[in-house]
Amino acid sequence: MVNYLLVKNLIELSEIFENQNKSGLYDNDINGFLEWTNKEFKTKVASKVEEPDWEGKEEGRTPESVISTLLVHLNRYAKMYSKSAISGSGFTTQEDFIYLINLKAFGAMTKTELIKKNIHDKPVGNLIINRLIKQGWVEQCSSSTDKRAKVIKITEKGLLSLENQMHKIRQATHIVTGDLHYSEKMELIRILDKLDKFHHPIFSRNIDADHLIDRVYSEYPVGKN
């Protein structure tokens, strides 16, 4: 049986699309129509989102302040669990095993690449790498693609040390996500990934701290959404 009401609604919706798309913002085909309806749906959903309560809201505390504070808190909680995960092992900090995990996952890379992947300043990153070399968990060798370049690679000893600690490390990561449901985890990944994509290019520019905030405010769409 044909659902004539649905057909009627689709025709009406397509008429609205054609009227709103006279400027040619979207392609005048099914793909353009779907892109438009998706944006319209998201806009309507966003307009219905209820604001949660937060400490200091009545006194004028902004959403940006709350988000920034919560991210700091979550980072400290994660470090607390990571510290427990490496207790009794040869690891000094969580950065030690994070560097090893990156080398295991992505293969050998230069010091600069490894440090940047972990969002560290060069002096801090070099200290971590030197500590890992001293432990015998990583080694510096010639690149297989460019003999003139030196790269850092994980050793068998490093792989073994990482594997011996992975059970507790995985437990720590599960605890960090708390009692979130699967759908909440997926939404959180989407939001955090969007923030990471915003901040990483800024980090990569190595803007001097004295000018960082002014440059970001003048060059990026901060607080305009």
Image: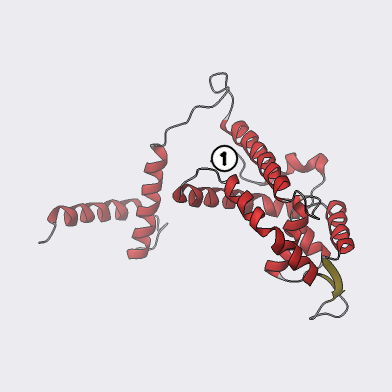
Which residue sits at x=79%, y=48%?
A: 207
Q: Quadrant of residue 139?
A: bottom right
SS under mark 1: loop
Tell which residue pokes out farthest to the left in this image: 1
In this picture, residue 182 sits left or right of residue 3: right
In this picture, residue 11 sits left or right of residue 87: left
- Residue 64 drawn at (x, y percent): 60, 34
Which residue sits at x=58%, y=50%?
A: 174
Q: Confirm whether residue 194 shows in the render.
A: yes
- Residue 170 drawn at (x, y percent): 62, 55
Q: Quadrant of residue 125?
A: bottom right
In this picture, residue 113 sits left or right of residue 192: right
Against 211, is 99 above or below?
A: below
Against 162, is 219 above or below?
A: above
Amino acid type at image mark 1:
Lys
The residue wearing badge 1 is: 224
Which residue sits at x=77%, y=50%?
A: 88
In this picture, residue 118 sits left or right of residue 62: right
Which residue sits at x=79%, y=54%?
A: 91
